[in-house]
Structures are given as structure tokens and as C-alpha cells.
Amino acid sequence: MKKIIIALTLLISTITFSQTQYEQGMKKALGLWSEGKPTEAKALFERIALVEKENWLPNYYVALINTTEAFVPANRDKISALLEKAQQAENEANAISPNNPELLVVQALIYTAWIVYDPQSNGMKYTGKTMEQYYKALALAPNNPRVVFSKAEFEIGGAKFFGKDTKPMCAQVAKSIELFATFKPESPFHPNWGLDRAQEVLQNCNTK
């Protein structure tokens, strides 16, 4: 019995240590990203993903950071490489957690980045695929603020391009802000971004 207790104690200690290492790594990586150091953040998330093979979050952030970097005008020459890395990480995360609305949003953002990069060549190719991701995410998580907002923002872009009324989409942006107010992520490391951007988009809606 004493040996069993010792073994269990060692097991619990190992698990606790492992969780602590994970938490420290995730905090540091998120901190690096918030400090404007995406390259360092991605590298750390990639290392965490190699250890946390059953955890979709590290690859989620690798995909998200690469995608957001693809929208930066200064990175135009790097867009293809960034989006290829984003897609690889997205695929790995999706293999761990399929039908995940947060990952569906990232996939939609990857498609959107390709459209922005070359609208003439990629608009027809990826617009339908983007909306497919958002409709699927909305069916799975209708009260997820990132799903509601990201879909509305994409539709606003399309409406402006074709000269259509953006009021219905702006109403959805306002709805997403209400959802952000009550949204609670599952952990400190689960997705919790988007409120600032939604407020900015709504402000622009109100000035039109």
C-alpha cells in the first residue's frame, strides 16, 4: 500500500509539473504575441505543440498568428509562406479537435487572407469556402462572439464591394459585442479575442 501511495504521489507530481510547464509556456507565448513579437511567439507555440500532442490550442495559435501576420501590408512578400504555415497548423489542430467553431473561424480567416492577397484570382475560389466555414461554425456555436463577429465582418467587406447595404451586418456586429460581454473562455488559454476589433468595426458602421 505504501508503494502504491508513493507511486500515485509521484504520478500526481509529474502531472502537476507537466501542467505547470504547459501553463508557463502558454503564458509566455501569449505574452510575446501581445508584446508584438509574433515570430518568437510562434516558435514557442510550435515547441509546445510538439509536447502537447492531444491539445489543439498551441497549433490554433500558430495558425492564428501566421494568418494575422498575412494581413499586414508589410508582409505581402511573405503571404504565401505565412498562409501555408497557418494551414498546416490549422490541419493539425483540426485533426485533434474536429468541428471546433474556433478552428472554423481561423480556417475562414485563412481563406479571407488569400482573397485579400489576390481578389481577382482568389475571390471566386475562396468566398464560398469562407462562408461555408462561418455557417458551419454558427450552427455549432450560435452564441460564440468570434463566430458572429467574424462572419459579419466578412459579409460587410462583400457588401461594400458590391455596393450593398451593410446595416444587417452591422446589427450582427452589435450582437457580437453583447455576446463578448457574457462570453467565458474555458481556460485562460482558450480564445478570447475580438472585442476591440468588433467595437472598431461597429464605430465605422455608425459613421456611414
Image (spheres, grey):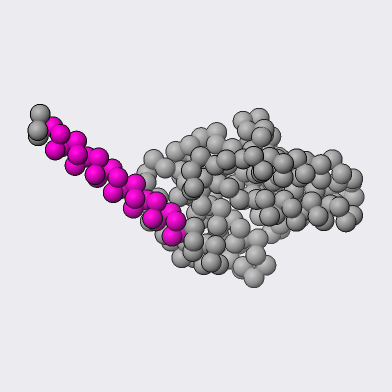
| Residue 90 percent location from the top left of the image | 52, 46
The stretch of residues the image draws in magenta is 4-29
Residue 153 shows in the view: yes
State the residue lying farthest toward the bottom: 74
**Residue visible at 43% across and 54% down in the picture:** 26
**Residue visible at 77% across and 53% down in the picture:** 201
As drawn, is 65 to the left or to the right of 24?
Answer: right
Q: Nearer the viewer, residue 6 or 51?
A: 6
When the figure is inspected, residue 71 is found, relative to residue 195, above or below; the finding is below
Q: Nearer the viewer, residue 1 or 91?
A: 1
Quarter of the view holding residue 179: top right
As drawn, is 94 to the left or to the right of 22?
Answer: right
When the figure is inspected, residue 17 is found, relative to residue 7, above or below; the finding is below
Q: Nearer the viewer, residue 24 or 138?
A: 24
Quarter of the view holding residue 170: top right
Q: Check if residue 188 falls in the magenta segment.
A: no
When the figure is inspected, residue 75 is found, relative to residue 116, above or below; the finding is below
**Residue visible at 62% across and 43% down in the picture:** 105
Which image quadrant: the N terminus?
Answer: top left
As drawn, is 6 to the left or to the right of 121?
Answer: left
**Residue visible at 66% across and 43% down in the picture:** 180
Q: Nearer the viewer, residue 103 or 143?
A: 143
Q: Secondary structure of the magenta portion, mostly?
A: helix
| Residue 45 percent location from the top left of the image | 44, 55
